[in-house]
Image: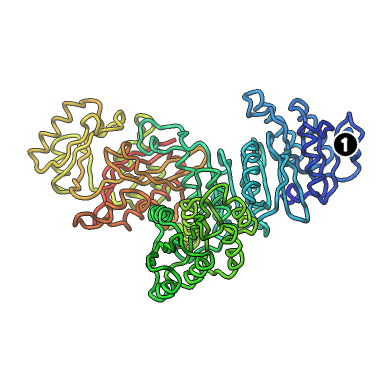
Amino acid sequence: MLKILEPKSIAVIGASRDENSVGFGILRNIIFGGYKGVVYPVNPRAKSILGIKSYSSVLDIEDEVDIGIVVTPYYIVEDILTECGKKGIPYCIIISSGFKEVGEEGLEREIRILEIARRYNIRILGPNCFGIMNTDSKISLNATFSKQIFKDGNIAFISQSGALAAGVLDYAKDKNIGFSKVITLGNKADLDEVDFLLYLKDDPLTKVILLYLEDISRGREFLEVAREITENYKPILAIKSGRTEEGKRAVSSHTGSLTSSDELYEAVFKQSGVLRVESVEELFNYATAFSNLNIPKSNRIVILTNAGGPGILAVDSAIRNKLSIPETSEKTKEELRKILPNYASLKNPIDTTGGISVDEYIKVLNILDKDDSFDGIIAIFVRAFTMDINEFCDKVLSIYKDIKKPIIITLMGITEIEQGLRKLQENSIVVYTFPEDAVRSFKELYEYKTWLERPRTKIRKFDVNKEKARNLIINAKRGKEGFIMEDKAFEALRIYGFNVVNFGVANSINQANSIAREIGFPVVLKVLSSEIVHKFDIGGIKLNIRNEKELEIAFSEMLEKFNDKIDGIIVQKMISKGYEVIVGAKRDKKFGPIVLFGLGGIYVEVFKDISFRLAPIREYSAHRMIQETKAYELLKGVRGQKPANIDSLVETIERLSQMIVEIEEIDEIDINPVIVNEEGAFIVDTRIRIR
């Protein structure tokens, strides 16, 4: 991987003398960008380009070539790639478009070039990409066709979209943001985000990694690599497009119908510590904070403002983003009284009012920096007649290195702040024009801290008879849409240690009475049928049967209604108290086994209060799954009700995670509801579908 980002020699195949062409733009950027290696233009119709000798073919180049950058029409890329293979070029960046992004014919072309690449052991970036950049002074490579000149920095950017990357780079230049690496993936025929994350993981020049992704090629590997990176103090911020696009739905199961592709990406990001953002503006707002500030010790902030309105906006945003706004210490208040007018507010937020001077504002800033009541400062400055913006920025620059707490500046305005804003940006000071942006950036810094300091739990392994459960499942009678009979599903769950509520299967009223007497009233009756999946919808469940007389009536009604459609009737102990939740698992084509948790019962698809994780799941993640849902507030106990046994619920999720991972024949498990109360989590209904 080193050679594609740190090449000693490059052949630009399709280099051109036409100044408006991509082939010219890439060659120009490589040469005039200060590239430290050797570059070979390849164009059979030109003897030289930009004063450099041109070659008819890469086969005519005498020396070794590390990278071939292909900028030719799509219909000759196969021939070009074959020549690169014969030359022994290990990497090719295919800028050319006309592949799978244009439809079936393009996909076929892409498959063919990948076959050629594999035949010659060439790694491909692209096709249909914008190129790469490495601002390391030892390399100084700009192999893109952008007309912009970029500054170096400590932010790496990986983008699946070349057009977006071009726009983002222009935006970043305006914000004075520098990069260590820029990598555009294009169609990802071969090299993808995981390959480059492995490189950036150990890149000393990269402090923050930004991602724009339309999909993730290798979900499991992405999770492991990204987690390793974020756990070692290198944050990753990501935009994942297509949030509303849902994956295929399984019509017969809650677990299947509740799972969308976006929710699985969300799960991957949470499990790997990747911070997901909503827009390009947020991406670079947060990247600026991470690249220039230390991680705060806590979520406690002080807001300093010289205008009341912006201070209130900052407070509102802080509360929404779960930041703490503690009171200043008495010592701090005493010192502030010596500086500020008596009508200034000494409570947090500190409102100096617009009547003070720049020097007085800076003195207040220094005082707040010494107060241990908070661990971050948001300093809001609005132009006033007594305070010059340029003077303010100069004074901030003079004391910035001495401020120990993370500080974010807000300069409110547009035209009048432009010069000062640029001055602060050029000196790597985190500055925004609106207080809400400052607050959200601080919140992201703190979110990353919570990830770094989270409990590092392991994957619990329960001692179960996996083979017994597997044999039971694969040999069980299958019903509608591949679901095994519910009694066999219950037995399989019991083998895996789940707390299945006592039950029996009856084919006569005498059997039903015998089972009910053994497990104790009240009981529930449920039809057992290979043809019926959703029993509740068609009256296939009778609840709260309190005695033998009620049992006989309910049993007779079920037999009469369903007649020859049933294989028996389940008699099960009635759990009368507790909260209904859903625990499920399924096998996704892209991500493999996943688990879900949420508010259950008949309203599960109405409220969709669901969280997801990839399996196998760690104990901490199981706790977080529960805490992320609104159901968690109920489970903690409301209006005098006892809190539910959360630990029992966590174990249920962990056991399900183990089961879906270990028994590969299972396509989907739906346990809804799990009834959880202060005593534990009880399984009362389940469906298991086999692949």
Residue extending farthest top: 105
In the picture of the structure, the residue carrying the numbered disc 1 is 49
Instruction: Sort mark 1 into few (<14), some (14-19) or many (20+) by Cα contacts within 10 Å.
Output: some
Q: Residue drawn 48% across and 58% down?
A: 380
Residue extending farthest front: 385
- Along the viewing direction, whichever of 468 and 212 lies nearer the viewer: 212
User: What percent of the width, then of the height, locates residue 185?
Assistant: 65, 40
User: What percent of the width, then of the height, locates residue 321?
Assistant: 41, 53
Residue extending farthest left: 549
User: What percent of the width, then of the height, locates residue 494?
Assistant: 32, 49
Say whether residue 384 is left or right of residue 639. right
- Along the viewing direction, whichever of 210 and 397 lies nearer the viewer: 397
User: What percent of the width, then of the height, locates residue 599?
Assistant: 31, 45
Can residue 685 be seen here? The reply is: yes
Quarter location, residue 108: top right
Quarter location, residue 678: bottom left
Say whether residue 274 is left or right of residue 177. left
Helix, strand or loop under label 1: strand
Name the amino acid type tagged 1.
Ile
Up/down of 544 relative to 225, above or below: above
- Along the viewing direction, whichever of 23 and 379 lies nearer the viewer: 379
Q: How is the image coloured?
A: rainbow
- Along the viewing direction, whichever of 296 and 212 lies nearer the viewer: 296
